[in-house]
Amino acid sequence: MKTVITSSGENNSAQFDKRFGRAAWFCVFDEETKESIFVKNTNTNANNGAGTKAAERIVAMNVQKVISGDFGPKAKDLLDKFNVQMVIVQDNDVTVQEIIEKLKA
């Protein structure tokens, strides 16, 4: 299963980013292979629709779960429509690697 973790940087030591549509990076973690790749979010500076565009990209990558701090209503509706599980994390002081370790456990 592929899980996206919103990230402020492009490596596992980067801070988790609570913003879904405006996160700088998406960490795509494959729970089967335990590998992660980072995909730049090209919608961070969009005037509007950043969350919806991010959700469309997540769906196109065949992701089954997204971990972020918040989802706007349109992004949530789109992710719901494609059965993408949304997990909300409220902790600002956590790294992408710490979230991955919890997924592995």
Image: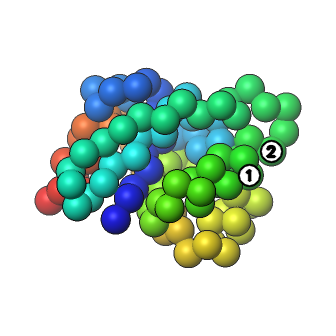
* Element marked by disc 2: loop
Q: Position of residue 27 (x, y in %)?
A: 41, 40
Task: Give the amino acid at mark 1.
Answer: Thr
Q: Please give the name of the residue rendered at 72% of the width and 47% of the height, measured from the top-left corner.
A: 53
Q: Is residue 76 above or below residue 42?
A: below
Q: Please give the name of the residue rendered at 59% of the width and 44% of the height, measured from the top-left corner.
A: 20
Tag count: 2
Q: Is residue 83 above or below residue 57?
A: below
Q: Which residue is mark 1?
A: 52
Image check: 93 left or right of 4? Answer: left
Q: Position of residue 30 (x, y in %)?
A: 30, 54
Q: CA distance from mark 1 to mark 2?
A: 5 Å
Q: Is residue 17 visible?
A: no
Q: Is residue 61 visible?
A: yes
Q: Are marks 1 and 2 in contact (CB under 8 Å)?
A: yes
Q: Position of residue 59 (x, y in %)?
A: 59, 60
Q: Which residue is mark 2?
A: 49
Q: Please give the name of the residue rendered at 71% of the width and 68% of the height, measured from the top-left corner.
A: 77
Q: Position of residue 94 (x, y in %)?
A: 32, 36
* Element marked by disc 1: helix
